Image: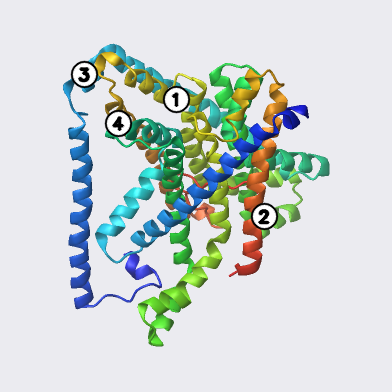
Amino acid sequence: MTTESTALYDVPGPSARRRHLLYGVASTAVILALAGWILYLLFDTGQFTSAKWSPFLYEGIQELLLRGLGNTLKAFACASVLSLALGAVLACGRLSDHRVLRWASTLFVEFFRAMPVLVMIFFVFVALKVQPLPALVTGLTLYNGSVLAEVFRTGVHSVARGQGEAAYALGMRKTQVMTHVLVPQAVRAMLPAIISQLVVALKDTSLGFLITYEEFLHAGKLIASNLDYDLPFIPVVLVISPIYIGMCMLLSWFATWVARRERRDPRAKAVDVAPAGGGGPPPGGR
Amino acid sequence: MDVLTDNFSLYGKGFLGTVELTVYASALALVLGFVMASFRVAPVGSFRVFGTVWVTVLRNTPLTLLFFAVMLGLPRFGLVLPFELFAVLALGCYTSAFVCEVLRSGINTVPRGQGEAARSLGMTFAQTLGTVVLPQAFRSVIPPIGSTLIALAKNSAIAGAFSVTELLGTYKTLSELGYNIVWTFVWIAVGYLIITLTISALFHVMEKRWGVAR
């Protein structure tokens, strides 16, 4: 499929197709050999001994993991709700008619987009001496709220100009134009990008691990450093990462699905629906 | 103010650590991203699958988890390297997935007709790629590559928490020395702003020079 949609290749003829098949078989063999080698390394270093996997049979440890997962989801829920709210407020500021308000929110957004999230989280945690959860949520909210403000603003600007002009011509005030005409369409257009940004927030909740918030990774660390089970580090990673990556992937796929749906929707006709960024676009602070 | 002047060498060391980490990891990310992008547009199916899996998995991995697995996991296989190298490896692999996507969408912005026209003029595959497709793709990927590398510079802060010398890690020493914690963080923030704004300016210049609006 890709071969047909780019400027790179001609449609392959019979001999080229045969050659590609040969390359395909050879490279599959190489990749499988690589996977086999990794599996061999795992066996060789004794990662599949029953002693290392036995902790997962205990109810207490399962509960510990589930509690960690719950804490991760709690931080994600708080951070996403708050950052959507902050994003909305900042977007209002940036789209305001008052110069002072506009400049203030621009400064705020640009500063927090250019800062590493971790610096903010550490600042709140160390300098303001708050608990890990509020520190994590504050840091995530400030960063993702600023990015979402830009997303909202781009969305409002992406609505076809005639829409706003028509609404003003009907005698609507700016607030009415925004709430009845521009914002509903903008949200429709930006929904995939918003969900992609929430994927970033979900991934970044793992930063809580670094400020001793008792989230999923922290629970894993506790199990992994247990001498009774022969330091089951690799088993812990093998259990934790599929769950973590799976959650993020589900949310990413949801974003892609929404994007495809919105693009077909006649109500999103006057806007360009933003593509879903998969794991979220790395937004640059500039 | 005297937090900075008293500890200039400490800040300098952290700052250079972050810059070093950013430069090496960017180089790795660009090379690996290029390889993965060529895998993803290759005519051979298994390469495409490999590239797609690489990108999908890494883009959905929390960077902290990746650091956790690389820093503490690889030594279990008898692979003992300095922490800096592990950090470069983790950051580079993570960012390569984003670079790959940027490059791939850059190649996809080149209209099909361009390649068809080049081939109908009798150009070989290498000529088509080198003189027609890639130069056009390059122009459109400059700004997104810039923001990817800025994100990488910001992500390098995580390495500090895994005992690699870099800018954010300096706060620990300074707070033990009893300096005002707020000012410590202000100067750390300034350091990061310098790095991100420099990358931003660099790519702005490159875009002015080579980027063409299409």
Which quadrant is the C terminus of chain B positioned in?
A: bottom right
Q: Position of residue A259 (x, y in %)?
A: 46, 50
Query: In the displayed structure, does residue B180 sit left or right of residue A184?
Result: right
| Color theme of the render | rainbow
Label 2, secondary structure: give it. helix
User: What is the C-alpha distance between the residues marked 3 and 4?
Assistant: 19 Å
Residue drawn 37% across the image and 68% down it = A5
* Residue tagged 1: A72
Sequence-first disc among 1 and 3: 3
* Residue tagged 4: B76
Q: Can you tell which of label 1 and label 2 is closer to the viewer?
A: 2
Label 4, secondary structure: give it. helix
- In the rendered structure, find residue B201 and report the number of the disc placed on it: 2
User: What is the C-alpha distance between the residues marked 4 and 2?
Assistant: 42 Å
Q: Can you tell which of label 4 and label 2 is closer to the viewer?
A: 4
Q: Can you tell which of label 4 and label 1 is closer to the viewer?
A: 4
Q: Is residue A218 above or below residue B146?
A: above
Question: Which residue is nearer to you in this view: A183 or A278?
Answer: A278
Residue A176 in which image quadrant: top right
* Residue tagged 3: A54
* Amino acid on which the number 3 mark rests in the picture: Ser
Q: Residues within 10 Å of mark 2 (few under 14, many from 20)?
A: some
Residue situated furthest bottom in the rendering: B121
